Image: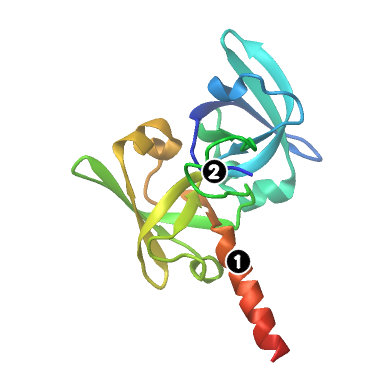
Amino acid sequence: MFTGIVEESGGVRAVKPSAKAIHLTVEMQSCGRGLKSGDSVAVNGCCLTAVRIASSGRRKLVGFDLLRETWRRTNLQFVRVGSLVNLERSLRADGRLDGHFVTGHIDGPGRITRWKRVGADHVLDIDAPPELMRYIVFKGSIAVDGISLTVARVTKKNFRLWIIPHTYEVTSLRERKVGDAVNLEADILGKYVEKFVSARFRRK
């Protein structure tokens, strides 16, 4: 479980496909402190397991093995050596919850249709498929590449977010452009409510 509060953006150092998996290596600093093999890290919002850890000065080089299914369903398929990815360690039981509950299980892709600076902030419009849009509500929470954000507007096909300077500066959003794919995870509470309500109607 995660919170959607990105701790840092790390640089991709290697992407190596094999017959069974994609080997992804990411350089990290604060997220690498105390990290052990088998620990979970959200990489662009996707929950991955650290399998290889090596030191590089004050930084850690952390390796992950991605299944082809994970590769195909997330925007990690588009990262290259030098790309920035958002990183967050899993939530501690005694930790603060500053964002919202994020599972690290990507629901599907979104596509940036507007990405523009307005004053000190940035406005971000994202198209999403109907099966995701049903869970996106005005003033609700959405995780975009692992970032917990508040929805500012919803239409039939897309939604709008306002990005403050801090979020722009500390996440990989500063590399994004119109047309780019982003990982989306809708608020899990909406999914449970939908299932509960639909089950009650079926019983009637």
- Image quarter where the C terminus lies is bottom right
- Horizontal side of residue 47 vs 149, given as left or right: right
The amino acid at mark 1 is Lys
Q: Which residue is mark 1?
A: 191
Q: Earlier in the sequence, mark 1 or mark 2?
A: 2
Q: Give me the disc on residue 28.
A: none
Circle 2: residue type: Thr
Crowding at label 2, few (<14), some or many (≥20) Cα neighbours within 10 Å?
Answer: many
- Secondary structure under the numbered disc 1 in the rendered image: helix
Q: Which mark is residue 3?
A: 2
Q: What is the CA distance from the residue labelled 1 to the residue labelled 2?
A: 17 Å
Please name the residue shown 55% across and 37% down the image. Answer: 79
Query: Which residue: 66% across, 24% down?
Result: 62
Secondary structure state at the residue bearing disc 2: loop
Task: From the top left corner, tell me how far across and down residue 73 is, in percent.
Answer: 63, 53
Residue 54: x %, y % from top left: 69, 15
Q: Position of residue 114 (x, y in %)?
A: 32, 54
Other residues around mark 1 within 10 Å, as few (<14) / some (14–19) / many (≥20): few
Q: Is residue 11 above or below residue 46?
A: above
